[in-house]
Image: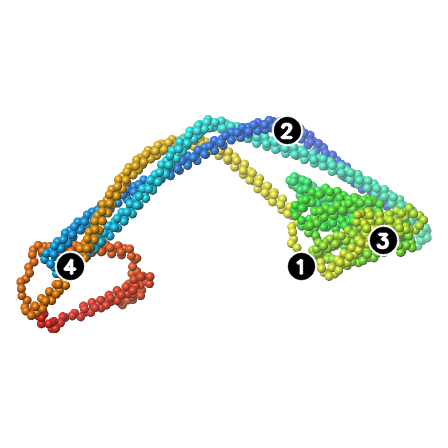
Amino acid sequence: VAATFEMESLGAGLSHSPQMNLSQLSLMSGSQSSIDERLTNVQQQQEIEGLRVEVKDLNEKLETLKIKRAEDKGKLKDFEKTKIQLQQLQEYKSKIQETHADLQRQLQASKKELSELQQEFEQYKEEMADVTETVEMATLDKEMAEEKAESLQAELDSMKEKVEELTIDLELLRNEISAKGSDGVAATFEMKQMEQQNERMKDALVKLRDMLNSEKQDRARSDKQVEKLEGELGLLKKDKERMQVLLSQHEKELIDLKEQVDAALGAEEMVEQLTERNLKLEDEMREIIEEKNDLEALNDMNEELQENAKTTEFELREELDMKSIKLLEFQRKLDGTQETFSEYDKTLNKFRELVANLQEQLRSKQQESETKVETPTVELMDFKTKFAETKAYAKTIDMELRKLEVQQANAHIKMIISFMPEAFMGRGGDHDALSVSLMIPRIINKAELLASQVKDKFDITDKIERDHVLKSQKAEQCSFGNHLILLLNVLQGVMKQYESALNSCSTDLFLKIGTLVPEMTAHEKSVDYFIDLLRKDQLDETVSLDLLEKSVNFFQQLYTVHLSHERVDCTHMMTNGVRVVLTACDAISTEIARLKILLLPGQEQSNFSILLKDLETCNNDTRTCTRKIKRRLPQEGSAAATPLKFGKEIQDLLTDACKQISAVARCLKIVSAGAMQQAAVMTDREGLLPKKMEELSQQATNEVYSKENTGASESLRFSFGTVVGTMNKLANAMENGEYDFDGTHDKKKHAPVKLRAEALKLQASDIEVIKSKVDLKEEEVKELKKQLKMKQEELSEQQIRVSLVEKKLENKNREVEDDLAKLQRKLDDGALQLKKKEKEFEETYDALQSDIDTLEQEKTELKERLRVLSKNTLLQNMSRQSSGQGALIGGSTSPVSGPVIQESQPLVQQVVALRDALHNNKQELIRLKAERMKKQMSSLLPLHVPKKPTGLASTTGTVPIGDVPDDITCKADLNKLVKRTKDLLMEANKMSACPRVADISARSQEHNP
């Protein structure tokens, strides 16, 4: 840069002042170069001294770490010994814990069995209490039945007495009637008396029947209860036997458990001692583990320091190599500047001679002008040199600042990576996936940079002349540049597809692609190789492009294997395809021009020249169609808002077209290279024969198309025909707007990088949560150990309590057995008494049944007598009526006269007795009817009593019969009764209000006294 600015300043000075002091300029340039060299040397010495100090510090740290490692070896041996002891103690502890767990399980089983026994015993108590209650209820029912039987027996006796009295009375009456005769009143009286007696007997019989039925029901109920009690008694006996067997088994188990508890009590002290020793060993083990962790941390730190030392040494070596390379470059630049200065000296000497000649001619005329112009030229020269120096200083400062920023960024990245887990940096981890995601845009930018620089370097033109092909390397350079740009464009298109696929693929596929980082970096170096050649100015047409072709094929194959099913950005794909096709068209046009020049003149009608013409027309057609497509593509700003959309078929057509046109370009390049070699050998002719060209084209197609080759011209025509058809189809579709944006955006997926970042954040938060949980669990383990000690103490106390409870249980069992024996005796006595009562009940039942049978017989006899008596009384009444009428006729003619019949005293007494008996029978009949009606009324449904209205709202105080509900069955009878009561009430009111006087004036004379 300084040299260029010095050249500009020199040119300006020469144009303004031919008489400039050239010695001052040479001194200034020399001083500038010496200052730069001194600055670089000082910087290098400072860096070297700083690196030496760092190396010295690292060596001291390494020595201290070696000393610490020697001390740690003894500690590690002690740690191994304690570790072995700890393992032995842990084994012993596990055995003791197993035995303790067995004892605990046995104790829990015994406790469980004991609780079950207690529950069964409580159930047995409750069942026995229920049995006693049922026995007491049976005895009470039995007593009630006895009392009822006694009362019924008393009633039966009284009824028998009444029947005897009535039979006596009946016999007396019969005797009197047979002896003296009776009138109609006596006969009716006797009939009524007999009817009353019959009714009383019927009621008595009904009552006896009800009593017998109730007795039968009570007896059946008592029989069922007795059967039920007998069944329960059998079950209780079986339960008692089973409980006795269980008690004997549990007593044996309790004896065994007592022995085990005694053995465990003896081992408890040993367990406590072992637990104390175990706790002490755990504390020691914890301390040893902490020391081990510290030593491991120190070891890791030592390894990290060693690695850092190695990396720093490696970096320093790399920096030294870079510095040496830079020094060589600066030396080369200095050599170049010296050469340029020598050339400038030569040109300056020529200018001096010219100036001397001109000065001689113009000295007289330009003395004044020289004095005026010399001062501003010198001032202008000084200003430009100062501006160049300040600009160079500003650029060096900017470069140093950027270098510092890069170093800080790298250090920051290293620090961040040191915080990440090993899985992040492992093979196929997130680091590799991120490297892939950064590598793809880096390759795209490198390819674009390389393509632009190659275009500028080789000055690629469309017009190829004969001199460019035969006399210079211009045509070959253009061919090389076009093919290199074509490969770089193809690589850019593939990388764009990678970018769109990796922005929408799944995280698993993203990580899977990350495993291919080493292979992809190896192929990235092919692009770096060409960039290095360009930087060193060694990139020319002699460099082979096979390495770049292999890289392109690798990336294409990798995409078809892993990412062919992912989302494709149609806009980028179409843009990259158009770029590739246009670049290939440029390369093909260059190769066709070269081949036309190399072909022997006058062979325009040959097959090869026709082939070239056909390819040229196809190339022109393809270029025009591609340009149409390019004009219809969305601009860079609106590509995201209005993207293109087309299907998989169009994508395959576009990819195939790019492959076909690339194959055609490569084939023509191979043919041109072979033709150039043949033309370099030949000296006589001005070109190659068409047959030779056809042979070269056949070899080229065999190399490019391999198995698919059907001949040079056919293969090339077919490939270019497919390309022209595809591009024409795409151009028409683009003009018709078939691939334009339809307004529906695809669902935007989250990039896998963001998803993995969120997942790692969640994992980190989960790790923190797990750490906190682990800390809590450790605290819980400590508390559980404390509780274990307390539980052991409680276990000893519980064992003592268990022994006491067992003693109490034995006493309770004895008391239960005594109570069971007493209950069994009582039950046996109750069964005997029940049998006795059953016998007595059967005897009374048989006696009552015989009494009922006799009463039935008497009833039938009485019915027969009553029937005979009723006939006799009817005959007597009829005879009395006839005699009474005759007496009345006789009395009407003559006055009444005759003696008054006087009744005898015994007959009067009998009548009085009969009246008393009749009164008593009536009273008894009324009482029985009342009881029967009372029972009937109690069995009836409750009456619906209507609410009687009172006060001013009711004038009569009566309730209308319509208010009676419809669900009452006897509503019609009620209506009749209401009507009759109304009539009777009116008649009573009328009779009470209007008293009636009997009219005796109309009495007959025969009634007068």
In the image shown, does 648 or 42 lie closer to the viewer?
Answer: 648
Looking at marks 1 and 3 on the same chain, the residue that comes earlier in the sequence is marked by 3
| Marks 1 & 3, CB-CB < 8 Å contact | no
Name the amino acid type tagged 4.
Answer: Asn
Q: Residue at x 44, y 27 (%)?
A: 259
Tell me if residue 892 can be seen.
yes
Q: Secondary structure at mark 2?
A: helix
Pointer 4 or 1: first along the chain: 1
Q: Nearer the viewer, mark 3 or mark 2?
A: 3
The disc, 2 or 4, on the residue closer to the chain's N-terminal end is: 2
Q: CA distance from mark 2 to mark 4?
A: 149 Å
| Residue shown at the point (68%, 44%) measured from the top left | 512
Q: Secondary structure at mark 3?
A: helix
Tell me which numbered mark, 3 or 2, is placed earlier along the sequence: 2
Task: Give x and y (percent) for residue 533.
Answer: 81, 44
Q: Amino acid at mark 3?
A: Ile
- Please rate how many residues cluster around mark 1, counting C-alpha atoms within 10 Å: few if below 14, some from 14 to 19, many from 20: few
Residue 743: mark: 1
**Three-letter residue code for mark 1:** Gly
Label 4 or label 1, whichever lies nearer to me, is: 4
Residue 72 disc label: 2
Q: Quadrant of the C terminus?
A: bottom left
- Please rate how many residues cluster around mark 2, counting C-alpha atoms within 10 Å: few if below 14, some from 14 to 19, many from 20: some
Spatial CA distance of label 1 from label 3 is 45 Å
Q: Is residue 871 left or right of residue 406?
A: left
Q: CA distance from mark 4 to mark 3?
A: 167 Å
Measured as percent of width and height from the top left, residue 994 is found at 18, 70
Residue 872 bears which disc, if any?
A: 4
CB-based contact (under 8 Å), mark 3 and mark 2: no
Mark sitting earlier along the chain (1/2): 2
In this view of the protein, which residue sits in the foreground, 580 or 849? 849
